[in-house]
Image: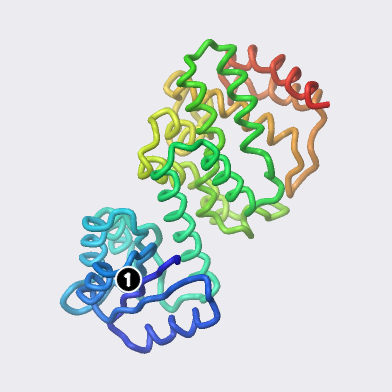
Amino acid sequence: MPTVLFVDDEQPILSALERMYIERDDVHCLFAASGQEGLEIMEREEVWVVVSDYLMPTMRGIEFLAKVKARWPQTIRIMMTAYADLSIAIDAINKSEAFRFVTKPWNNQELMEVVDEALMRYQLVQSLGTTKDETVYLSLAQTVELKDPYTKGHCDRVARYAVALAKAVGLAEEKLDEIKHGSWLHDCGKIGVPERVLNHPGRLNEDDRESVMQHPRWGSEVARQARMSEAVVNVILYHHERFDGAGYPSGLRGAEIPVEARIVAIADVFDALYSDRPYRKAYTLERVMEIMEEMTSTHFDPELIRLFLPIARQEVQGDE
């Protein structure tokens, strides 16, 4: 059962957290009053997510989480503190690779969302890391899509378009499989993005936009932890890079972007334009083709677009 360990030296805090989860029968909660007690619990229990206070006697939260990282690297780590200090956050990230940084006093709903996202991430890493069955990759992608009903079927369609383009380029069979798997999982980092943000019908504020822009990094971390191939990680991490260097998260330009990511980026945008989204209806095929051509000088590899547009037309018409 999904298990969360809360570690805090103040009993009222632990009691408040216990009350917060009193009606949740889908999560098993454990509580520890010190870092040492937390480590002892983890020796006995399979803990998916650990939430630790920062300022505790004997063993501070960062030291505790660093020990957790060394002993149980698969456990997702969250730091909680009343001291919203940048140096503490940087320490938590550098020393324990904390998944999130939560400040006290917390909002119950927001804290539950963070913990639920961490639980989903743990499950995703474990599933990817323990199977070679590609149907599991697709089912996990479909689980992510449940957070955003407008993207139903998106990952599968992106894979179909991307593999067709990769074949036209002449890539090896092994690379085709990696592009298919990367396409299925390219948005898996959206597990870390709240549903209210994914389904927002209008323009996002700066904080929410930043949250969405983190999904390639979060997803690639999951893929690395699951020991997936470099090509799959590249697709997940770089599918929002632009040919002119104005993309994210790394601002790569031209051939600096791995070819598998350049291919999936084209397929991703094509399907996004040709599908309904919360903020607009799908464009017609002809308008999509025009937009893709207009974006070529900024977003896409011109040679790949030249190959892709007739392939996309053929794939779409084959569905009609």
Q: Observer-nearest residue: 103 or 189?
A: 189
Callout 1, which amino acid? Ser
Residue 35's x, y, as percent? 23, 73
Please give the residue where the numbered disc 1 appears in the rendered image: 52
In terms of image quadrants, where is residue 95?
bottom left
Residue 264's x, y, as percent? 56, 28
Furthest residue in direction left, as rendered: 58
Identify the residue at image location x=68%, y=44%: 151
Q: How is the image coloured?
A: rainbow
Number of other residues with Cα within 10 Å of mark 1, as a class: few under 14, some 14 to 19, many 20 or more: many
Residue 280's x, y, as percent? 77, 44
Looking at the picture, does residue 182 appear above or below residue 23? above
Residue 101 visible to the viewer: yes
Q: Observer-nearest residue: 232 or 273?
A: 232
Looking at the picture, does residue 224 appear above or below residue 230? below
Residue 39's x, y, as percent? 23, 70
Identify the residue at image location x=61%, y=26%: 266
Answer left or right for 242 relative to 2.
right
Looking at the picture, does residue 49 appear above or below residue 296? below
Q: Quadrant of the N terminus?
A: bottom left
Question: Helix, strand or loop at disc 1?
Answer: strand
Identify the residue at image location x=27%, y=70%: 44
Q: Quadrant of the C terminus?
A: top right
In terms of image quadrants, where is residue 102?
bottom left
Looking at the picture, does residue 175 appear above or below residue 144? above
Answer left or right for 165 relative to 177.
right
